[in-house]
Image (tube, grey):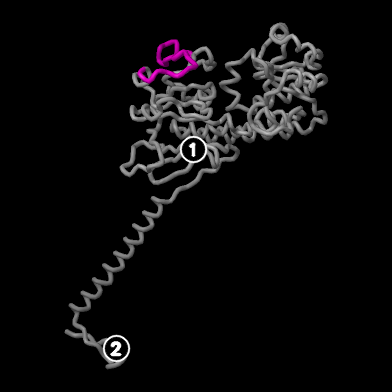
Amino acid sequence: MYIEIPGESSGFFLFNLQQIRTVKAFLVLSVISLFLCSCTARHKQTKNDSTSYHLSYAKNFSIDSCAYGIVARIGEQGGKSWGYLLSGRKPQNMPADLIWIKVPVQGFLTLSGTDVGMLAKLKQENRISGVGNSKTIYSPAVKKNLKEGKIRDFNTWEQIPFEQLVRTSVNVITYSNFGKDYPHSRELEKAGIICLPILDWKEEHPLGKAEWIKLYGYLTGCSELAETYFSQLNRAYNKLKNEAKQYRSHPTVFCGNQTGEFWFCPSGESYEAKLIADAGGNYVYKKTKGTGSLSLTPEKVLMTNKKTQLWLNPGIESKEALVKNHPKSIYFGAFKKDSVFCYSASMNKYWENAAVAPDKVLSDLILIFHRKNEKLHFYSKLK
């Protein structure tokens, strides 16, 4: 049986039914093939694409997603950086520029109080397998685990011997990188222990330091909790900052103390200076550059601050001890007016929690600068 189909030149083409069925099948298969190729191409494109997660304040790390998991990059823009792939399994085609961290991390060795504070805020204290020095711990949960032998206290500020580390249940060492890698980091990596530098101390904004909790969130499988916490913290901090603007007075403030031959105090672009400004204080060294510490002679600090109204963070919790260590303290105007405040009475509490709760620090400073005689969270007046 043949069917006549109109043609352009000869008028009609003759096709039998079998030929028509063959052509139809070919067309259907071609369409399916094109569809599958299109889907495969889109899938490959999705696999290669990465999504950057927005960070509001932090400048010394980034979070991105890729086909294999989460990519965390730590380091300053234009400077040295470290890249890590956070995933449950190590991919076969591991990117050459990344170090794999199996998540959620089961065992942390925390060498900074800030690390403990971040993990505690996420209720992940049980993931801490070791601490550098138990004497600096504030967290009740971590203290309990130390007492029960669940956490190893390495009891040292120095380098921990390689042999001791590989015999522990530690998977990740978090440490403050001050310009150099953790000793034997490559050898430790081969043994399954990853050294993770934490650069929150380089952040210029208090909320930039606190935003590092997002990194801990991805390391522990608590990213949603970390995002929620930071969102609430951001609102609380900025609400306090706006409330501080209602006060017309701006008391003059200086910080720090003498160590050896020099007086160390925050630079004008540091997060401490930012806290003072947001609380409505007039920081004496606010126009200086840098995010670290200024090294000044005690004589110069004394000449500059004879009439400065408030003295913060002398590093000592009583006036008697302050005079004993630094006799010239009696010549500062703030000392004479009984306006010296410090967190020394709650040292461990401050160093463990201040970075992750800058709203509490800001609240303390607002009360010190403007309202006086109210209960403080971290600070207390030297007596």
Secondary element under disc 2, as helix, strand or loop, is: strand
Residue 160 in the magenta stretch? The answer is yes
User: Would residue 66 appear left or right of 308 to someone viewing this image?
Assistant: left
Secondary element under disc 1, as helix, strand or loop, is: strand
The percent coordinates of residue 210 (x first, y second) are 58, 31
* Image position of 383 with respect to 273: above or below: above
Residue 146 in the magenta stretch? The answer is yes
User: Would residue 15 appear left or right of 79 to someone viewing this image?
Assistant: left
Quadrant where the N terminus is found in the figure: bottom left
The percent coordinates of residue 268 (x first, y second) are 70, 31
**Residue drawn at (22%, 87%) of the image:** 14
The percent coordinates of residue 258 (x first, y second) are 68, 16
Quadrant in the rendering for residue 357: top right
The percent coordinates of residue 25 (x first, y second) are 24, 71
Badge 1 amino acid = Ser
Q: Which mark is residue 193?
A: none
* Image position of 297 with respect to 46: above or below: above
Badge 2 amino acid = Pro
- Residue range highlighted in magenta: 143-163
| Foreground: disc 2 or disc 1 | 1
**Residue drawn at (48%, 39%) of the image:** 73
